[in-house]
Amino acid sequence: MGLSLLLVVALSCCAVGGQRCVKIDNCKCEMSDNSGIINLKSLASSTGQPRWEIPDGVGWIYRYNPCVGFNSVQFSDLAVHQISETDPTQEYNLGIQSSEDFVFSFTEGTSVMYSDDPDYPVRKSKVVLECVSELDFEHELQFIGELIVTEYDFILRGPCACPGLCDDFGVLPEPTTTTSAATTTTKSDVDTTTTSTDGGNPNPVQTGLNWNQVGADIVSLIFHDLILVVVIGCVIAIAKFLLGYTCYCSQPTAQYKGQTDTYDKGITVSQAELEHREQKNSKAKQMECFMEDNSGYINLKSLASSSGGPRWTLDGGDGYFYQYNPCVGFENEKFTDLAVLQVHENNSNLEYNLGIQSTETFVTSLSKGLSITYASSASAAKRKSEVILECIPGSRDHELQFVGELIVTEYEFILKSPCACPGLCDDTGLIVADASTSPQTSTTPPSGDETLQPDPVGSGLNWNQVGSDLVGLIFHDFILVAIIASTIVIVQYIMGYRCHCYKIGQSMKFTDA
């Protein structure tokens, strides 16, 4: 009851005051700060087909048309539609035009929300409007992903996502209001505060945390947890009835009360020793891959520190430091051949292997582009890391950013560097001649126009794109951790129980002190 009251108060406080975009017509809303009207009508296709069709690379196509509904075999009045590339009978309604709603949040700005049913939604879509004030910019739609089950996120970029830059027929020659320039942002400046017209003070926009935005996410998480319970139950059944393992909890007898802690420590040392032996035999990889489109090699060897330590040490803002070194493994007292390491800020004994060099793998996806993945072990890895490579061809700097632990025990980073571009670096560093005379080998043009990047997400997995979803996850994880911690405290310290698992037919042995 107390925790529920705390959540209600927190949501209410964050929803007070702030910016809004008030819907005045289909595909139109007006900013509450009088900066202008956002008008998407000119982007609609009136041919009966959607304006955009985006394949996700894994067998699905996502279709979107603002303002005007389109039809499929099973659905009508569609705004957002998901259909199989190979089987047109497999299709899903991700939102209809009549459910359109404009919302505003501090983390994402203005978004258009859709659902498959206004009264009883099963699936919903969110189209974040990213203002690009250049009038000749070609409008583009980007599919971010299904970040939460049955919720699909997109980003629509262009001048019509800006207040006052478009009417019903298209882009206006000049902004219709004198304040639009103060409220619009460009692609590189979207995720912090919006500048107001009253002397440059930031708007106190904090309407993002309300049930319209995170309520349905929490409902999805509840269904997710129910599925998780079923999966755990199946695992327990397999372990017990197929593999012959059994677990029990009991209060220690007088014979073993003095040996319990020694027994637990024996298990910990054994696991650490096995991991150490596995890592000791691994070898550092040659950090290089060749793009299948023949655009060139991506070579990160010059970024590696050969001093025996990591190239980067980042403060994650969560009480831990994160260390990363590409190509060449580093080590400490517990681990060897490290690529990624997590160390507590105040207690250096609390450290975790987030990935070793021998597990390095290059992967590509439509949403993230090229990434490098690492695992803490070649088999049965407990923790994983992903380093998203963001090509910055006009720069000489190499920057690493920590995105967060978006999924439990999976850590994400972004490496921004010219060496993340095909053909711009060799084993010794930046190839100046290639960078200046062969811009076609880069995945983005040297002018800095990022609209041609095959990795449109780049720095996308941050508060600008997934802020509201992360808020729901943070609340969910906080409650889950509190429940688990309370259960452990009650069982172990109040009831005095200890739990052990063993295979039937094998005797249990306690480690001698």
Image (cartoon, helix red, strand yellow):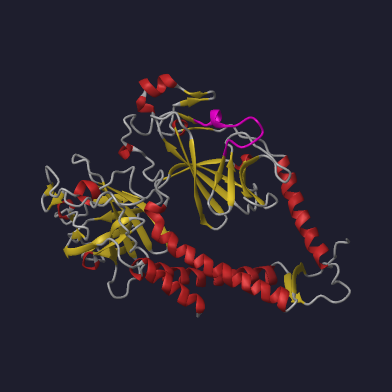
Image coords of residue 75 (percent x, y): 25, 66
Q: Position of residue 208 (x, y in %)?
A: 35, 63
> Which residue is depicted at the point 44% across and 65% down?
472
Left or right, 383 with reference to 260: left
Horizontal and vertical percent for residue 239? Answer: 68, 68
Q: Does 303 lie within the magenta span?
A: yes
Q: Quadrant of residue 47?
A: bottom left
Quarter in which the C terminus is drawn = bottom right
Looking at the picture, does residue 396 appear above or below residue 248?
above
User: Left or right of 166: which side holds 357?
Assistant: right
Residue 215 appears anywhere in the view: no
Residue that appears at 32% across and 54% down: 154
Of residues 230 and 440, the one nearer the viewer is: 440
Q: Is residue 471 above or below residue 388?
A: below
Locate residue 372 relative to residue 18 in the image: left or right: right
Q: Residue furthest front?
A: 199
- Asked if residue 48 is among those painted magenta in the image, a careful observer would answer no
- Which residue is at 18% across, 59% downward? 30
Q: Which residues are magenta?
A: 299-312
Quarter-of-image position of residue 501: bottom right
Q: Position of residue 319 (x, y in %)?
A: 58, 53
Towards the viewer: 419 or 110: 110
The image quadrant that residue 369 belongs to is top left
